[in-house]
Image: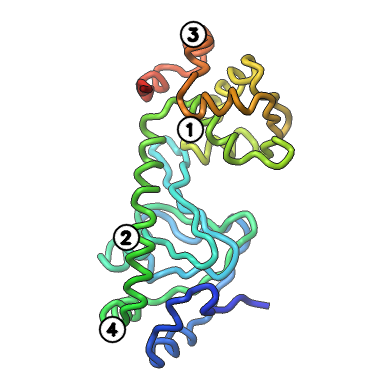
Amino acid sequence: MRAALTEELFPFLSSLSKDARHALGALVPARAKPHRSLLRRGDVAGGAYLILSGSLRVYYVSRGGREATLYTVERGGTCVLALAATLNEEPYPACVDAGPAGGEYVVVPARLVSRLLDGERAFRDFVFEALSGRILELMRTLEEVGLDQVQQRVARYLVKHQGPDACVRASQARIAAELGSAREVVFRALRSLSELSLVKTGRLRIQIIDEAGLNRIAKGLGLASEARPVAANTGTGSSGIRRRREQG
């Protein structure tokens, strides 16, 4: 059974005119399989994406081929970069894949998006709220990718993604893709955290042993590089040193 565009997911629908609701209701939902590519940099976005189920991962790829997630669009949300590209008639500036459970969505064509923005206040409010909600998130992401020290970012990822059993189930390659780094850099960061007895690594599994200590590193209060300068010198490399930011 396919998901549908409902007021439960998108409350602004209840405040639209009859014609606007009819136009949106006539859109046919699309379904994407898990991790399927939907947009690549330079593609025509073609409209606004309204997510009905699952999720979409929005990310960029560096010149060196590394991936870094910008944000994830969950059900009831919309991709602000697709909106911006559509409104400005510019190529899509990033990449989009369906999430691990796939995704269902409708694409509101560019002409209809313009019509709704011009004549439907509820839709305008929805768009502006989505845009404003992502600005600070994108700024934080860009700051982390460009400035934060690798060990701190890995520690923050582990704290955020741990399960009820204090385990993170993800490959080093997956963590590297999420953080916009290289697998070898993530490997060295995990090895350093393991040497500090903060985590224990295994195949597709990272056990958090000392959550309080890992939290200190995640918050920049006690970096592994300060505790073990030798590991830092051999683990981060010149690119990691250039990205290092003094804390406090």
Quarter assignment of residue 171: top right
| Picture disc at residue 181 | 1
Q: Amino acid at mark 2?
A: Pro
Quarter assignment of residue 163: top right
Q: Which numbered disc flags the more N-terminal residue, 2 or 1?
A: 2
Q: What colour scheme governs how the chains and residues are painted in the rendered image of this protein? A: rainbow
Do callouts 4 and 1 mark residues in contact (Cβ within 8 Å)?
no
The percent position of residue 231, horizontal first and vertical second, equals: 53, 11
- Give me the residue at 38% from left, 22% from top: 247
Identify the residue under disc 3.
229
Depth check: give the residue in front, 134 or 145: 134
The percent position of residue 189, horizontal first and vertical second, equals: 55, 22
Q: CA distance from mark 3 to mark 1?
A: 21 Å
The percent position of residue 90, horizontal first and vertical second, equals: 28, 62
Do callouts 2 and 1 mark residues in contact (Cβ within 8 Å)?
no
Q: Amino acid at mark 3?
A: Pro
At label 1, counting other C-alpha atoms closer than 10 Å, the crowd grade (few under 14, some 14-19, many 20 or more) is: many
